[in-house]
Image: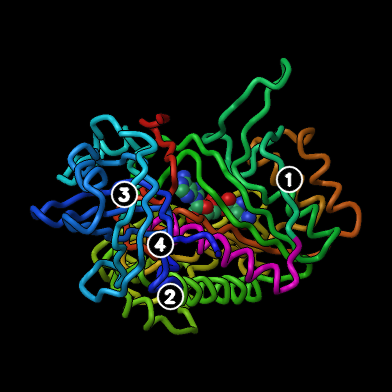
C-alpha cells in the first residue's frame, strides 16, 4: 500500500493506516481523547475511546507533550465535523520521542519571540501555509518560463562587481582579494541571453540594506528572465503573463492555504488583464492628487509606492523613470534621453514594487561613459563590455522578488514571514 499522508486522507477511507508525525495539540473529554497530529502535509484529528483501545495506549495520553514525535496507527473515517473532513480511530501509538516543554504554545506570542524560534515556528499552521504558497509561486515561475522557451542558466553568487549600486554591497574576502555577494544575476544573464536567446536565473540576492521597512530583507530570492532582441513593451507583456500565471496556479493549488491565512480570495480571483501601464510622470501626478509631493528625478520610497498601489486593484506597471535615479546599465529613451527605458511592477493593496527591469544599454561607447558617470571601475566590467563588442543586440529583462510576491499574495504585513529564515538589518539568527 502507498505510504499514508494526511493531505491524501480521502484516498484511504475505511483503511488502516500509519501516521508518522508529531503531536500538534490534544484535547481530553474524559472517556474520549483527541490528538491533533501533523505529518508535514496536514493536520488530522485522531480519536480514542476508553474501552475501545488497549488500556496501555489509552493511558499514555497524559504523558504526551506538544510536538512529541509519534507513530500512530488507526482507521480513517470520514467526519464532516473534523478539521480536514477525516478522522483517525486510534489503534496504537508508538512514542518516538517525548518532546520537552515546547516554547511555542497555542497562546499568542510576539513576533520577536517567534522569530527567535523561527526553526520551530515553521511548524505552525500559518507558517506552513505561507511556505507552501512560496514553494508554489517558485514552481509556477519555473513552469511558466520553462514552457515558454526560457533556459535556466544559473548566475554566480560570488562576483567581482556591483550590479545594483555600490552602497548595498556585502564584501567578502576571496583568497586575499575583495569580492561581493551578488545583488542580482542580471549581468551574467545578459551574457547567457546572447548565447541562448531567452534565459532566466533563479537564486538568492544580497543587499546590505540599512532600511528597516516591511519590504526589505538583506537576503532575498529573485527570478530573473532576460531576452535577446526584446524591447520594453514585450518585457512588460512577459511580466504580466508571469504574474497572471502565478496567481492562477496559487488559486488552483493552494486555495486551502489562502483560506487559512484569511486572504481575500475573491480579490485575487477578480484580477484581470490588462494591468495598467503608467509613466513615471503620470505616477507623480497621481501622487500629487493624493497630496504627496515628490521632486522630479527622485525614486519612489515606501510611502510613494504604498500610496500609488492603493489606487489600483490589479498589479500595475510604472515605466520610464528618470535615468538619474536608476542603475548604470539602463538604456535611455531615444526620444527623451533623460528617461530610462525601465519598468517597475507594483502589487496593489499598498504592497508596492515586486518587479524591476527594463532595456539594457547595448552600445559600447555609451556604456563606457555610464560606467565612468557612476564611478564604476571599467576593468571589472571588461567581460560585460565584451557583450557590446561581439554581436551586441537590444535586450531586456526583469527581476521578480519572491518574498514580496509571496507577501502580497498571502496578504502578509511584512516580508520576514515570506522566507523560511529571514536575514534583516537586525536579524541573522537562527
Ligand atoms: O528592482 P531591483 O533592484 O532590480 C534588479 O535587481 C534587476 N537587476 C533585476 C533584473 O532586471 N534582472 O530588484 C528586483 C526585485 C524588486 O522588484 C523586489 O521585488 C526585489 O527584487 N527586491 C527585494 N526584496 C526584498 N528585499 C530587498 N532588499 C529587495 N531588493 C529588491
Ligand atoms: Mg527596483
Residue closest to the eye, 203 or 187: 203
Residue closest to the eye, 383 or 327: 383
**Residue 365: x %, y % from top left:** 81, 50
Extent of the magenta region:
129-151
Residue at 44 percent of width and 40 percent of height: 421
How crowded pointer 3 is (Cα within 10 Å; few <14, some 14-19, many 20+) is rated as few
Nearer-N-terminus badge (2/1):
2
**Does the Cβ of the disc 1 residue fall within 8 Å of ligand 1?**
no
Nearer-N-terminus badge (2/3):
3
Query: Of tags 4 and 1, which is closer to the observer?
Result: 4
Residue closest to the eye, 21 or 379: 21
Instruction: Using the numbered discs, state the Cα–Cα distance from disc 4 to disc 2 in whole angstroms.
Output: 21 Å
Residue closest to the eye, 298 or 167: 167
Q: Is residue 118 magenta?
A: no
How crowded pointer 2 is (Cα within 10 Å; few <14, some 14-19, many 20+) is rated as some
Q: Specify the quadrant that holds the N terminus.
A: bottom right
Q: What residue sits right under mark 1 in the picture?
A: 369
Q: Residue furthest right?
A: 390
Instruction: Using the numbered discs, state the Cα–Cα distance from disc 3 to disc 1 in whole angstroms.
Output: 53 Å
Instruction: Using the numbered discs, state the Cα–Cα distance from disc 3 to disc 4 in whole angstroms.
Output: 16 Å
Q: Specify the quadrant that holds the C terminus.
A: top left
Q: What residue sits right under mark 4 in the picture?
A: 6
Nearer-N-terminus badge (3/1):
3
**Residue 272: x %, y % from top left:** 44, 84
**Does the Cβ of the disc 3 residue fall within 8 Å of ligand 1?**
no
Residue at 73 percent of width and 58 percent of height: 152
Query: Of tags 3 and 1, which is closer to the observer?
Result: 3
Q: What residue sits right under mark 3 in the picture?
A: 124
- The answer to whether mark 4 and mark 1 are in CB contact below 8 A is no
**Residue 425: x %, y % from top left:** 39, 33
Determine which of the numbered discs, if any, sits on residue 251 in the image: 2
Main SS class of the magenta portion in the image: helix
Amino acid at each position: 500500500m502507498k505510504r499514508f499522508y494526511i493531505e491524501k486522507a480521502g484516498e484511504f477511507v475505511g483503511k488502516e493506516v500509519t501516521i508518522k508525525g508529531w503531536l500538534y495539540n490534544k484535547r481530553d473529554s474524559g472517556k474520549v481523547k483527541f490528538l491533533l497530529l501533523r505529518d508535514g502535509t496536514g493536520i488530522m484529528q485522531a480519536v480514542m475511546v476508553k474501552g475501545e483501545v488497549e488500556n496501555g495506549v489509552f493511558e499514555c495520553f497524559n504523558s504526551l507533550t506538544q510536538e512529541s514525535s509519534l507513530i500512530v496507527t488507526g482507521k480513517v473515517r470520514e467526519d464532516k465535523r473534523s478539521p480536514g473532513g477525516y478522522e483517525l480511530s486510534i489503534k496504537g501509538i508508538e512514542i518516538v520521542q517525548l518532546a520537552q516543554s515546547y516554547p511555542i504554545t497555542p497562546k499568542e506570542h510576539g513576533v520577536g519571540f517567534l522569530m527567535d524560534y523561527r526553526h520551530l515556528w515553521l511548524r505552525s499552521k500559518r507558517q506552513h501555509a505561507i511556505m507552501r504558497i512560496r514553494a508554489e509561486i517558485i514552481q509556477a515561475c519555473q513552469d511558466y518560463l520553462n514552457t515558454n522557451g526560457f533556459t535556466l542558466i544559473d548566475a554566480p553568487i560570488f562576483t567581482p562587481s556591483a550590479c545594483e549600486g555600490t552602497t548595498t554591497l556585502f564584501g567578502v574576502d576571496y583568497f586575499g582579494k575583495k569580492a561581493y555577494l551578488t545583488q542580482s544575476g542580471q549581468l551574467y544573464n545578459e551574457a547567457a541571453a546572447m548565447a541562448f536567446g531567452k534565459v532566466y536565473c533563479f537564486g538568492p540576492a544580497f543587499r546590505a540594506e540599512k532600511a528597516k521597512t516591511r519590504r526589505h530583507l538583506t537576503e532575498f530570492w529573485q527570478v530573473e528572465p532576460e531576452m535577446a532582441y526584446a524591447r520594453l513593451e514585450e518585457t512588460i507583456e512577459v511580466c504580466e503573463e508571469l504574474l497572471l500565471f502565478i496567481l492562477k496556479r496559487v488559486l488552483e493549488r493552494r486555495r486551502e492555504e489562502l483560506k487559512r491565512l484569511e486572504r481575500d480570495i475573491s480579490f485575487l480571483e477578480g484580477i484581470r488583464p490588462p494591468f495598467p501601464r503608467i509613466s513615471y510622470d503620470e505616477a507623480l501626478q497621481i501622487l500629487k492628487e493624493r497630496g504627496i509631493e515628490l521632486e522630479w528625478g527622485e525614486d519612489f520610497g515606501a510611502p510613494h509606492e504604498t500610496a500609488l498601489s492603493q489606487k489600483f486593484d490589479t498589479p500595475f506597471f510604472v515605466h520610464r523613470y528618470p535615468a538619474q535615479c536608476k542603475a548604470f546599465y539602463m538604456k535611455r529613451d531615444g526620444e527623451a534621453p533623460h528617461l530610462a527605458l525601465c519598468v517597475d511592477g507594483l502589487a496593489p493593496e499598498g504592497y508596492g514594487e515586486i518587479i524591476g527591469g527594463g532595456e539594457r544599454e547595448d552600445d559600447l561607447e555609451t556604456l563606457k561613459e555610464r560606467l565612468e558617470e557612476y564611478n564604476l571601475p571599467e576593468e571589472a566590467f571588461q567581460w560585460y563590455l565584451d557583450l557590446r563588442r561581439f554581436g551586441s543586440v537590444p535586450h531586456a529583462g526583469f527581476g521578480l522578488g519572491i518574498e514580496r510576491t509571496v507577501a502580497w499574495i498571502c496578504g502578509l504585513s511584512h516580508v520576514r514571514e515570506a522566507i523560511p529564515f529571514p536575514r534583516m538589518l537586525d536579524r541573522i539568527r537562527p
